[in-house]
Amino acid sequence: MNIVGPMLLSGVLLVTELVCVAKTPPVEQPKQQPGTCCAQGFDVVSIKQTKENSDNVLMFSREDGFNAQNVHVAALLNYAFDAHEYQIIGLPDWARSTTFDVVGKFSDPNEVALKKATLEEREEWVAKILVERFHLVSHKEKRVMPVYDLTVSKDGFKAKQSQPATVDQGHLADSVNPQQGMLYATNRSIFGKSAPFSDLAPLLSGIVNRSVIDKTGVTGSYDIKLVWTPEQAMLSNAPQSSQGPPDIYTALQQQLGLRLSSSKAPVDVLVIDSISFPIAN
């Protein structure tokens, strides 16, 4: 499933287009630690199949609970286990096509503890929903899979290291003002100011739906701007402007002096041993 929307790590928010690069730890089943905040998970969980046919997708974690509308199970797995779609093995077709509205709440929330809850704890709460209501059984392993090697093209790396006094927001979508030190992406652009170059490969992985391995040797922080035309738009019957940006692979070479080349390597994957369609409530 391809959900593209704003993601804020302390309270994830996804709304149609903007995403923020997130951490990419190894995929594994979360483990509760004794004494952590709300270790038993949500007291009340509601799951209903989405009734209206809509392209609007909403998923966010807040201090008093979790709310997701019109999301596939693959998106919940992505949130709970930091697993991109290409890392999820054995998911049935319905889990990628059927959408659900999911709400998790605490009946008597400890507001102080909830404010201190970490992203990992919030992921565990959603993982518990998947285990208890979708009867998820899964395990992690490594599998050799197609990957992309990210290298510097023959023309050399084209991005410039960040300058504290320079800000270029002309390309930002929907008047989004990026925080320094972070990369953002829409379904057709990546941008950021003073962003660590090491964040680019994990972000590209979600966009090209394949693990991207950074072999550039580039270090440091940069003001990055990359604009491309999504593959879906190129394959559609809609007329394409001759002045429009190229596909992401060409754009990387032309705009950043980077190249994606096919390879194979061991990749962390989440294997779905079993999962069931939930009973609505």
Image (cartoon, rainbow, N blue to C red):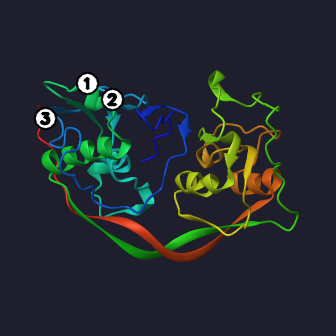
What amino acid is labelled 2 in the image? Lys
Separation (CA) of disc 1 from disc 2: 6 Å
Q: Residues within 10 Å of mark 3 (few under 14, many from 20)?
A: few
What amino acid is labelled 1 in the image? Glu
Quick check: 46 above or below 208? above
Seen at 53% across and 62% down, the residue is: 210
The location of residue 2, given as percent across then percent down, is: 46, 45
Circles 1, 2 touching at the beta carbon (< 8 Å):
yes
Q: Residues within 10 Å of mark 2 (few under 14, many from 20)?
A: few
Q: Earlier in the sequence, mark 3 or mark 2?
A: 2
Seen at 57% across and 56% down, the residue is: 208
What amino acid is labelled 3 in the image? Ala
Nearest the camera: 170 or 3?
170
Seen at 32% across and 32% down, the residue is: 68
Circle 3 residue: 280
Q: Quadrant of residue 172?
A: top right
Task: Say what secondary structure mark 1 lies in.
Answer: helix
Seen at 56% across and 56% down, the residue is: 202
Quick check: 26 above or below 165? below
Does residue 255 appear in this view? yes
Separation (CA) of disc 1 from disc 3: 29 Å
Residue 115 is tagged as: 2
Circles 3, 2 touching at the beta carbon (< 8 Å):
no
Circle 1 residue: 111
Nearest the camera: 30 or 205?
30
The location of residue 54, given as percent across then percent down, is: 39, 28
